[in-house]
Image: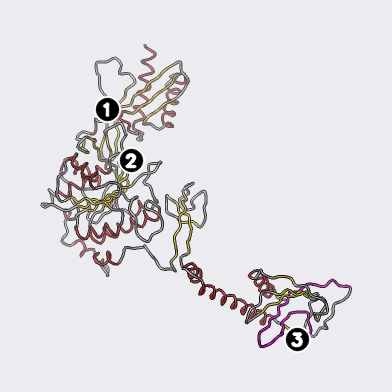
């Protein structure tokens, strides 16, 4: 018997496990060495499995050598209503009542058995109730589970400790999606919303035709005032029509206040010559809460429209009726797209909602501002591909106990990422700082004798220079330790070791404390000299004292 025949028989035995052994006598069988197993009866086809004691070839007499151990061979017997007992076997049995079965006959028998099983399955589906039976027959409604990296968005078939794409550990998140027969659902907005969106160019357009008659002012939406100019500097000269801007930051740092003031400047439209409508959509606050904040900040424009919603299609429909100059969504983790798997804030929802907002911005030429939450590591929550989709990514930084706020650009397709905006949080909102160079200096007492341990570092952040004050303290008689704030611990240890080795200062017997005023993180290496000067000043003053 061929290997394919044995596989076919094994498949039959696996699929039909309701086989029961029946006791037979030697007299009831043509060959005493046959033991029959009868399966479930079928109106059109019945199956018998026999284990023969000897495998014989065609023409070989039906006998078993007495001294040899008989080898068991499976045989298949088929009986149809027209033929009461026409058997098909591969070995054993008498001729006349049993016909020999070759490989082709065995394969055809297996096909008939599978067909009979399929017919019974269809019958069960037809007689069943509900949609579960129909779903099992058609294959629709199957749930597919996969693991997606929260950093890069790479999909994996199973959980792994490390992402194969970005190499990060413990970033795979599980999500399930339903397969509706291969039809894409929820990938785009509904036809009702899509009908009023402007259609893009069907053919490539020459560069000369694209830039013809368009000046620099037409490519930017200007922002007036000191606050507006500070934001425009970070964005590269103003707001680009049709751009998608993502703003991230820690909770309570002032992201909503920032976008509300930007919306008010666009709605007032002083430099545009006319007022422009702006739609502010919030999924976290009610319109009354936003109105209370606007009243506290002194915003009274009538062209700023507030709306509370979390449905992307609903937001697009409201934008059609208002025709705003800019759209603000607060935040991207609260909105959802119908038909997509997962809840709002999930990996799939955040990615698809951002893609639809980008499509909306490019088709309508309306700039869209998104507010994004950050995770524990300080990065924007959601897949890393989110930052690749948008045009600009802005981070707002600041300490909880400090009024200083920094607006930094980490990605900008329309300008430089070296610019930095400096603001101060007040009761009326964010105010631009006119002299940011001296805002990180502590109180100066030039006539005091306790100026030891203080040094000023001049650093560059973007295209601006800042004066940053560094404070050092050396205490002897305590356990040797290093406590730093605003400075990397490795850099501080290196500077202390260099002073102890090269300058001969016995700093290893002192506890050293370092602090940067206003909670700024000093990353530039230009501040190393100021750190060393502050430590030496404090240590030498302690020796003289």
* Residue labelled with disc 1: 441
* Residue labelled with disc 2: 251
In the rendered view, would you say 135 is above or below 405?
below
Picture coordinates of residue 191 (x, y %)?
29, 67
Q: Nearer the viewer, mark 1 or mark 3?
A: 3
Determine which of the numbered discs, if any, sits on residue 315 in the image: none
Please state which of residues 74 and 538 is positioned toward the viewer in this rendering: 74
The dominant secondary structure in magenta is loop
Q: Residues within 10 Å of mark 2 (few under 14, many from 20)?
A: few
**Magenta span has 83?**
yes
In the picture, residue 540 is in which quadrant?
A: top left
Report how far apart the C-alphas of labels 1 and 3 lie in the structure. 108 Å
In the rendered view, would you say 482 is above or below 524?
above
Q: Secondary structure at mark 1?
A: loop
Q: Which of marks 1 and 2 precedes in the sequence?
A: 2
**Magenta span has 363?**
no
* Residue labelled with disc 3: 97
Which segment is the magenta one? 67-96
Q: Residues within 10 Å of mark 1 (few under 14, many from 20)?
A: some
Q: Nearer the viewer, mark 2 or mark 1?
A: 2
Picture coordinates of residue 53 (x, y %)?
80, 74
Q: Quadrant of the C terminus?
A: top left
Image point (19%, 35%), residue name: 434
Residue 407 falls left or right of residue 303:
right
Q: Quadrant of the N terminus?
A: bottom right
Q: Which of marks 2 and 3 precedes in the sequence?
A: 3
């Amino acid at each position: 018997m061929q290997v394919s025949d044995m596989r076919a028989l094994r498949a039959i035995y696996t699929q039909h496990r309701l086989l029961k052994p029946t006791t037979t006598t030697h007299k009831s069988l043509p060959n005493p060495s046959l033991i029959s197993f009868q399966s479930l009866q079928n109106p059109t086809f019945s199956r018998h499995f026999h284990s023969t004691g000897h495998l014989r070839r065609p023409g070989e007499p039906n006998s078993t050598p007495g001294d040899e151990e008989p080898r068991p061979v499976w045989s298949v017997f088929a009986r149809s209503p027209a033929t009461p007992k026409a058997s098909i076997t591969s070995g054993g049995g008498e001729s006349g009542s049993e016909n020999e079965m070759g490989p082709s006959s065995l394969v055809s028998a297996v096909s008939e058995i599978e067909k009979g099983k399929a017919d019974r399955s269809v019958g069960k589906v037809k007689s069943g109730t509900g949609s579960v039976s129909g779903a099992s027959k058609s294959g629709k409604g199957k749930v597919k589970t996969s693991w997606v990296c929260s950093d890069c968005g790479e999909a994996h078939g199973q959980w792994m400790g490390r992402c194969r794409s970005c190499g990060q550990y413990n970033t795979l998140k599980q999500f399930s999606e339903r397969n509706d027969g291969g039809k894409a659902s929820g990938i785009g907005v509904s036809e009702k919303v899509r009908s009023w969106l402007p259609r893009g160019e069907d053919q490539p357009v020459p560069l000369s035709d694209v830039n013809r008659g368009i000046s620099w002012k037409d490519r930017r939406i200007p922002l007036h005032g000191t606050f507006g100019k500070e934001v425009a500097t970070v964005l590269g000269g103003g707001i680009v029509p049709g751009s998608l801007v993502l703003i991230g930051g820690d909770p309570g740092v002032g992201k909503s206040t920032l976008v509300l003031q930007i919306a008010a400047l666009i709605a007032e439209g002083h430099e545009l010559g006319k007022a422009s409508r702006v739609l502010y959509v919030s999924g976290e606050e009610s319109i009354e809460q936003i109105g209370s904040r606007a009243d506290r900040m002194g915003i009274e424009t009538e062209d700023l429209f507030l709306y509370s919603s979390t449905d992307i299609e609903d937001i697009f429909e409201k934008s059609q009726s208002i025709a705003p100059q800019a759209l603000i969504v607060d935040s991207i983790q609260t909105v959802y797209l119908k038909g997509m798997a997962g809840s709002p804030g999930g990996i799939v929802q955040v990615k698809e909602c951002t893609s639809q907002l980008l499509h909306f911005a490019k088709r309508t030429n309306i700039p869209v501002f998104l507010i994004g939450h950050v995770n524990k590591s300080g990065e924007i929550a959601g897949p890393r591909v989110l930052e690749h989709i948008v045009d600009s990514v802005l981070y707002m930084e600041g300490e909880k106990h400090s009024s200083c706020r920094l607006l930094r650009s980490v990605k900008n397709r329309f300008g430089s990422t070296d610019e930095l905006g400096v603001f101060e949080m007040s009761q009326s909102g964010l105010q631009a700082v006119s002299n940011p160079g001296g805002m990180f200096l502590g109180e100066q007492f030039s006539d005091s004798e306790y100026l030891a341990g203080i040094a000023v570092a001049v650093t560059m952040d973007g295209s601006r220079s800042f004066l940053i004050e560094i404070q050092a303290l050396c205490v002897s008689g305590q356990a040797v330790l290093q406590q730093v704030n605003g400075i990397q611990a490795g850099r501080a240890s290196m500077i202390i070791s260099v002073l102890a080795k090269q300058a001969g200062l016995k700093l290893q017997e002192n506890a050293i404390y370092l602090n940067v005023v206003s909670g700024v993180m000093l990353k530039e290496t230009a501040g190393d000299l100021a750190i060393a000067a502050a430590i030496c000043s404090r240590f030498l003053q302690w020796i003289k004292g």
